[in-house]
Image (cartoon, helix red, strand yellow):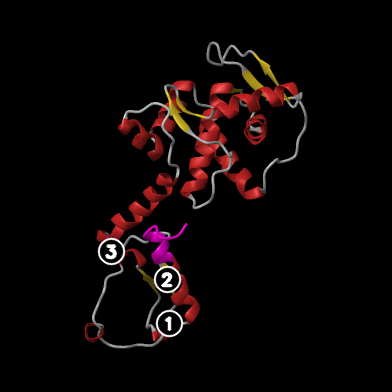
Amino acid sequence: MLSILLAARELDLSVTETHLVGLLYLTDVAAVEAGHAPISGATWRLGRRGPYDPALMRAQDYVVESELAERGDDESADAGAGVLSLTLVVDDPLDREAMDFVRTVVALHGGKDTAALRSVVDATVPVIEAQAGGESGVLLDLSRARRRRQAEALLARARTTLKTEYCVKLAQGTANLPSKCWVRTVCAQPFLKEELGDYLGRLPPQVVALIEDNLLACLGLVD
């Protein structure tokens, strides 16, 4: 929570309590899409106004009562929504990688009004799938955000010139290759040995291990 407020202050943005929840959720989704654990620690459920966790309201009250932040009014903010702002100069409350996610999300979405931010939140895969179930209060499966990226990589099977994050680049001369190329991990297919054609050479063990790791990640078998 403090990380969102810090990133917003750096960009001179007002953050309402409603915006804070949405930005926290989008930060968690961004982290999961990149293969990391959620950052906020929230247990996200789908409510009438979007993702929520009752613990976040208590956390907001705590930072205000602790005088780490204050509530105020802002004519540019949404009616009825208090603005939260830091009262102290604080260092980054999270590690650098986590703060990179926070700052990126706040820079992209912190200046949006409530309706625009809600549209971004509603377009995330966990919310779309939960809304399809039609139940209020259902837990959001953020891991679905990661699987979306894996699905996009698998769809690239039909695009033979499009590399993905799971493909592995080989330099010229590796295993006697005449030119540099990409190992299209997302296009892995079984072949009989007699169908492999000319044998050029053996890949280094570390390259084989990387290809295997990327293949498992692409198939969603590892985090």
> x, y percentage for residue 203?
43, 82
> Relative to 65, is 128 above or below?
below
- Amino acid under label 2? Ile
Marks 2 and 1, the one that precedes in the sequence: 1
Q: Do the CB atoms of the residues marked 2 and 1 lie less than 8 Å apart? A: yes
Marks 3 and 1, the one that precedes in the sequence: 3
Quick one: SS at disc 2?
helix
- Amino acid under label 1? Leu
> Relative to 57, is 218 above or below?
below
Side of 107 relative to 118 (left or right)? right
Marks 3 and 2, the one that precedes in the sequence: 3
Quick one: SS at disc 1?
loop
Quick one: SS at disc 3?
loop
- Amino acid under label 3? Thr
Q: Check if residue 9 falls in the magenta segment.
A: no
Q: Pointer 1: residues within 10 angstroms few (<14), some, or many (20+)?
A: some
> x, y percentage for residue 161?
31, 63
Residues under labels 3 and 1: Cα distance?
22 Å
Q: Residues in magenta? A: 214-223
Where does label 1 land, which residue? 203
Where does label 2 land, which residue? 211
